[in-house]
Image (cartoon, coloured by chain):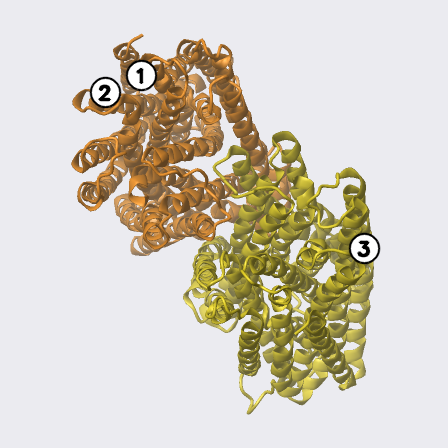
Chain colours: A yellow, B orange
Amino acid sequence: MSEVGLLAIIFVISIIGLVAAFVLAKWVLKQDQGNAAMQKISNAIKEGAEAFIKTQFTTIALLAAAFAVVLFIGYAFLRKHIDTDPVGTSIGLAFWITLSFVFGAICSLIAGYTGMWVSIRANIRTAAGSIRSVNDGLQVALRGGAVSGLMVVAMSLLGVAGLYAAVKYFSAVEATKIPFLIVGYGFGASFVALFAQLGGGIYTKAADVGADLVGKVEAGIPEDDPRNPAVIADLVGDNVGDCAGRGADLFESTAAENIGAMILGAVMAAKVPDASPLWILGVMMFPLIARAFGIIASIVGIVLVRNKNDEDPMTSLNRGYYIAVVLAMIGFGIASYWLLDHPSAPQAWWHFFLCGIIGVVTSVAYVFITQYYTEYKYRPVLSIAEASQTGPATNIIAGLAVGLECTAAPIVVISAAILGAYYLGDSSGFEHAGLFGTAVATMGMLATAAYILAMDTFGPIADNAGGIVEMSQQPKEIREKSDRLDAVGNTTKALTKGYAVGSAALAAFLLFSAYLDEVRNYGVPLESVDIAKPAVFVGAMLGGMLVFLFSALAIRAVGKAAYFVINDVRAQFKEKPGILKGTEQPDYGRTVEIVTKGALRQMIAPGLLATLMPVAVGVLFRFVFGMGAEVVASMLMVGTIVGILMALFLNNGGGAWDNAKKYIETGAFGGKGSPTHKAAVVGDTVGDPCKDTAGPSLHVLIKLLSTITLVLAPLFI
Amino acid sequence: MSEVGLLAIIFVISIIGLVAAFVLAKWVLKQDQGNAAMQKISNAIKEGAEAFIKTQFTTIALLAAAFAVVLFIGYAFLRKHIDTDPVGTSIGLAFWITLSFVFGAICSLIAGYTGMWVSIRANIRTAAGSIRSVNDGLQVALRGGAVSGLMVVAMSLLGVAGLYAAVKYFSAVEATKIPFLIVGYGFGASFVALFAQLGGGIYTKAADVGADLVGKVEAGIPEDDPRNPAVIADLVGDNVGDCAGRGADLFESTAAENIGAMILGAVMAAKVPDASPLWILGVMMFPLIARAFGIIASIVGIVLVRNKNDEDPMTSLNRGYYIAVVLAMIGFGIASYWLLDHPSAPQAWWHFFLCGIIGVVTSVAYVFITQYYTEYKYRPVLSIAEASQTGPATNIIAGLAVGLECTAAPIVVISAAILGAYYLGDSSGFEHAGLFGTAVATMGMLATAAYILAMDTFGPIADNAGGIVEMSQQPKEIREKSDRLDAVGNTTKALTKGYAVGSAALAAFLLFSAYLDEVRNYGVPLESVDIAKPAVFVGAMLGGMLVFLFSALAIRAVGKAAYFVINDVRAQFKEKPGILKGTEQPDYGRTVEIVTKGALRQMIAPGLLATLMPVAVGVLFRFVFGMGAEVVASMLMVGTIVGILMALFLNNGGGAWDNAKKYIETGAFGGKGSPTHKAAVVGDTVGDPCKDTAGPSLHVLIKLLSTITLVLAPLFI
């Protein structure tokens, strides 16, 4: 098939994905919106979320614009053109890299916005649906989530393919060098994702912690009680943190990893003897085609989800997931045979197909490990619940131990996956195809990304629906239904977080292999990243340190922003004593505004640290020691390792604390209100900023490190 | 000077060190032992500590013996002799390596035992001394600590020099290859240190947490109250955890780093043109000579400490420290000029002298950074105290943020030190002398190790003295004096912990450079440790994971052992209701026995993980991928980086929580007994296993990783 044909397939399937998202959105919007009391709450959430997103996105856009200007000036005027540049002039290079960056940033903003837009409309409809039946609620929430999932994946694909086509037809760049120009797309996306996830994550937990500490602990009113001035801010938080943040995060993952895999594919294919230019192109396009097939598989899976015979809603969601996985793998096999088969290596295509299977198996393994460490059926969470009997201190100690321990199994799994995929690639019959093998495994893992993201966004929608049902004081049997969906939402959120770390870990290897290929492409003979050299070792230490410092800033940001919330809620209780008696209405908007400002101010420091430190290290070591590229590589690699460990620690530790509390609330060890429960609430609160702010931001940090080094590599050489 | 002359100097100074220790011990034992009530308590502590050490050391000795047998069989029969081996036969190699291992283990046991032996005798004399004056208490405690400090450093020096002489005169091994044979000494020492620190660390915190949770929290009796059945176990814990554990730890540091520096010195000196064999020998002996001079400097510093005009005891200790530092640096300069000067590089000696200064400056910087993060004069601890106002959850969140943040400055300092020392060495005029420069910096940092260890052991002695004064119900003005010493002890403990991490970080680079030299010496052309290779990257991930998993096991061990204590104390209160009324005597011995058993059982799992995982990884990757040495190297390096970060996090986080509580106890935010104080107590309890079990064990783990790979390198090739 010709290049045009390949691009056409990708474009058509991406557009199918967007159309499917549009159709699902229309379907969701057509659903019943419940009664006036519910709508009032829902409208308050909508307003709050939109106000936050507007301010946040303006800030991010300004930061991105500033960075774009610096990027352009740096490439066009400060850096000297060298012969190995993919474009003939410095201005040309600067133009394409900056264009990709800006385009990536814009697409990421759109992806984040859409996710939130649908989710704040799906929540009320899910609440109304769950009044009728669990199935109705489930379908609205999942399809609402799917809008965001499909949009993100389809748009990232369309963006990469579109940029490729643009460079191809408007410049004279060699096809295999195009990915080096469009890496800016991934970086633009990560740049936005980092701030979106940080801002959203800080917002959601500041509101949550603030609402809990004054509402539940001080005033003794239940969760989601309309008398709490921070309750709307808390519900808004679910949307801006989990939907907008995660949407931007996964958008960036799929974009960056597609481009990274294209780079590795192009490098490998170019070395195959007698390879026709078209075949090389096919290998390079393989990641995009495989992703496109995955979109179709995810659409089928989503549409088929149905809650039968009042089964556990999680079973219904899992059924849809397995359908999507099987279809995606069939598509993966077809794409492998079609694009990766070559007469010189007859067994190559199924070797790479197996790499894809490794990716899928890895994601399933991550899901199981996450379940083991965060569900109260198993030893870890039970040990925390047990330790809560002797007070908050032992609860925290037990949680720290669980969080630290839970890093072991995922690292073993990812090690096996990397080595297995590398070995399969290496023995495929192509030369130096090991790294491409790991890239294909990543593609396999991400094949069902759209479905996973739909499940993820399902979480906050169901959570919000539960809040609306609670606040509008519906009868108990309806609350039970919405609670069931809410509980499932908590599970899907935890699982998809596990999936996100797993894919970040696997993708990391792909991305820094791409970085090394890029550096070599610029003519630097960087054969190894030798951490036995002092400067390189120092780079590695700084990478690890960046992760610790970033986590510190992210966790502290929540504390600081929560502090404003606490003060405002206390002030409102004092100004209007009728609030607690239920005779006066709290000023929800004021609290929302305060969290918005607080969260946005707090996201700047960690965000700038993450973006500026790699640049500073690269430039410094280039000019002082003449080895910027290698030092940055080790910083990136060890930063990634430490980032994965820390993210697992924070995510699973936080999840385990959360569920230990929930387990006690089922009546164990004295149940709700007992001293054991109070101790467990402390752990839950501690876990909040860990699992919902710092942990998810670390996923983005890991990928940002990769994309920023990919984009700035020429400056470090 | 001839080889015999150099060795003679080292032997003579080591023996001076031992004699000084002996004289100080006699001086301490001559001091007044207080009244009968005090002696009764002191005897109970003595008995408990001795019982624990006896059981613990038997267990460790058995483990070490088993490991020695495996080591001997592995080298003598399983591994094939190769031409590059330093000894002619496999049996010969096995003999020397196993002998060094056993000798190192025995010396480490002796060092640990002596530290504790003196400390449990100095505590009562310090208590009696502080009845007279602060100066009397201070001098007894410091000189008691100095016995252990001098013993450790002198014995480690004597051991290395003695083994060197033994190999030299009983075999035909080339002088520059001897260090490869005696690396077993460092490994034997680390092996014992790991279990000693783990067992002691678990014991001390299990007893502490157990005593606090049931005594202070449940029964509402004050700390160190004689009615608490766990109170003696708590006081015993200070001796076995802080004295015996830290003694073995620092013994191992000095031993391993001496040998590592000798290896690097020999490699560098052999490359100098026209270098006479005697000059090469002098370079190789430089670390030992510099260390010997440091012993003299420390003795002078210790003897001169005197509390004048009722000044802050910390000022007196610092004055002694500065004297020791200045003298040690003068000795360092002399040794540099004498042994490192060579006609081919006239500026070399002062370059290396400056490296030594860098080492000293680094240790001072670490002390200041530790102070900043753990003292309540500064922002970090104050932020935790402030956060305690909103409850235990925000206290913990603030503490986590401080712990994570505090890793940044030390990493920057150590990076600058490594790069600076490397640059100075590299520009010394000798070829490839950069690594030796970092080794010399480490020597500079460790020059005053004996003084530092004396200050460190001062801590538990003063702590115990305070406990004895408290339990024997002395009048208030005496308690105030002993409390002042106790407070200073807490500071010195925290500072020396900072020093220990700093030296571990700086030494790490020295030790793995030595490892690479060793691997090359065995004929393997390992030119780089390239983490861009999949297997090497996997090794790096596994190294980072080991640190997390090890920390999890160490922290959990405290929880498990504390659980037994809690149950026993509750049982005793129930069995003898008169205890709380003060009419019945609790059975201290029973609790001591229970902690002993619990701590020893819990130390096995983390200890075996740390020793067996590097071996397993090295052997597996050797046979499956044929690259054991490189994979182990990356595991070691990244494990070290993550270990340093984690140790800083745990030590300083824990210290900050502790002092936030102490700050509130001075009356801030409501003072003792307020809800803020209760919240801060939670943080303090959480910090205990972090800063006194997991953190210090990580220092040992880092060095164990280095020494185990040094010893087993031939098996991975």
For disc 1, the chain is B
Q: Is residue B664 visible?
A: no
The image quadrant where one finds the C terminus of chain A is top right
Q: Residues within 10 Å of mark 2 (few under 14, many from 20)?
A: some
| Rendered image: mark on residue B165 | 2
In the image shown, does B329 or B39 lie closer to the viewer?
B329
Residue in the picture at 44% in, 24% down? B436
Residue marked by disc 1: B17
x, y percent for residue A344: 49, 66
Amino acid carrying mark 2 in the image: Ala
Residue marked by disc 3: A61
The image quadrant where one finds the N terminus of chain A is bottom right
Inter-mark Cα distance, 3 to 2: 70 Å
Numbered disc 2: secondary structure: helix
Inter-mark Cα distance, 3 to 1: 67 Å
For disc 2, the chain is B
